[in-house]
Amino acid sequence: MSAIHLHYDVSGDDFTRAGEASGSVKKRLKSLGYDSDAIRRVAIAMYEAEINMVIHAEGGFCDVDIYPDKVEILLSDKGPGIPDVEKAMQEGYSTAPDNVRSLGFGAGMGLPNIKKYSDEMKIETTIGVGTNLYLTINVHNE
Amino acid sequence: MNTYFHSVELEVDKCCGCTNCLKRCPTEAIRIRDGKAHILSERCIDCGECIRICPHHAKKAHSLELEDIKKFKYNVAIPAPALYAQFNNLDNVNIVLTGLKAVGFNDVFEVSRAAELVSEATRKIIKEKKSKLPLISSACPAVVRLIKIRFPELCENVLPLLAPIEVAAKIARKEAIEKTGLKSEEIGVFFISPCPAKVTEIHTPNSVEKSACNGAIGISRIYPELTKAMDHLDFKDIEPLSRSGLIGIGWATSGGESAGILRDKYLAADGIENVIKILEDLEDEHIRGLEFVELNACSGGCVGGVLTVENPYVAQARIQKLRKYLPVTLNHLEDDDIDNMNWENELKFDADIFRLSDDIVKAMEMMDEMESIYKDLPHLDCGSCGSPTCRAMAEDIVKGEAKETDCIHKLKAQIQSVYDQLKGTL
């Protein structure tokens, strides 16, 4: 077999449920006996991306493909799009509203962290249409 | 898988095969097979939740009896500070310690004294920035075992210092040898324990090759004789045996160990579900900026252990009262103490416990099969099949340890379809 495919719907506006998808993927990777460093990076990158979908895009879905040596993740939303990707990639840059920040989110570390923990990252974004975020996390053999 | 010793045991006759323990176990280590509970030894962390929940008292914790100390020429009791919280209106710890001598021990050495040494050593480690932060307390053996089987990325965060029991046992043994001139094997050192996890830790330690402690007697086991002995004590008989400050005694309750760090970037969580949540969040780096994390599997901390007698919150209130007039700490590290307090073995992740197969391709095939089995199960997580959840059942089926018709809902549907077919032929 080539890959295990998982699909999750991410509901918008519900912080208590953010992290359900990344938590479920983490649990499965542990059962597979996956490399623990790769599991950690998948869990962190995916959680940050999930939170982004909740804060900015009223949810969406995510598709996860698990291969023996890598995990590919697509996070897709029909949100407002990212006007300036380069700016959004800067640490500390945030457009999150105050009510979100008061919950401790929106510190402007989302995308920079996602980039830091994944091996490949691609953003497709169109204003008013939505954003697709493609991530690849490889198992780094020591 | 009989290499694992557990202090949680099942009394088969009393078990009626209900699903209470099955549903409560935090590591999904219980299955009901042939109408009786079975503990999956490699997954059990001896937290004692099944003992707490069982309405039929079919689960019990292994504990030695007072009789067992007679095998040794000289015996030292090392009581957990949680013991002091079990007595109403106690205002002097020496009454308990003298009571322990009255029930048969030759001497006592308080675990809270060793706890003060561990607190000081922890402060030193944090200050000298010698370990990966946050440090996770190594005092609760159920938590250490949980990390060992479920949280590979956190193994190196575990405080590499022996738990206070082990430190206390080492010192008590050394002092007893010096005092009596007896050989080590003639001296018995017994922990008076609030929980089964510590009983297991003495038997098969994570941190050392062999524990300096000979065994553990549950607080609830020794309680009747001890209270009787304490009642019979005359005021003039009470010996000044206690040498613990408020830091050491405070270790009995959740937050006590953290308070002993004398810093503010700490978190203290108690209750196994909360502990798991915190470990998940630490692993995913949702929690940042801490120096120390204290985790206790039991609600309220050690006073909540299943071998205690008193309600943990009442016990907590008593500990507060007992600490009130004590000095901060009465025990201090000597030059080479800290070297004797380090773990002998590094904490290594046990990858085999929860993974489906050691071959990832095979594991992926199994998981694929699990997902398709799971889809057809009723998702009620009722536990009637003997597995704790439908997902766990799917895993058990793939491993060949259960079959689909163990699910009573599936079975009912099958019977219904046979009935419908027969009805058609009549």
Image: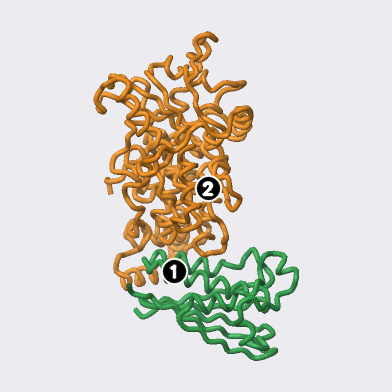
Chain colours: A green, B orange
Q: Nearer the viewer, residue A96 or A6?
A: A96
Q: Determine the residue positioned at 28% across, 49% down.
A: B1
Residue corresponding to mark 1? A39
Amino acid type of the residue that numbered disc 1 sits on in the rendered structure: Ile
Q: Quadrant of residue B174?
A: top left
Q: Nearer the viewer, residue A108 or B46?
A: A108
Whether tag 1 and tag 2 are in contact, CB under 8 A, the answer is: no
Amino acid type of the residue that numbered disc 2 sits on in the rendered structure: Glu
The answer to whether any part of residue A127 appears in the image is yes
Rendering coords of residue A63 (x, y %): 51, 79
Q: Is residue A114 above or below residue B10?
A: below
Query: What subunit carries mark 1?
Result: A
The answer to whether any part of residue B9 appears in the image is no
Disc 1/disc 2 C-alpha distance (Å): 24 Å
Q: Are discs 1 and 2 located on one and the same chain?
A: no
Q: Is residue B367 above or below residue A95?
A: above
Q: Which of B2 and B314 is in front in this view?
A: B314
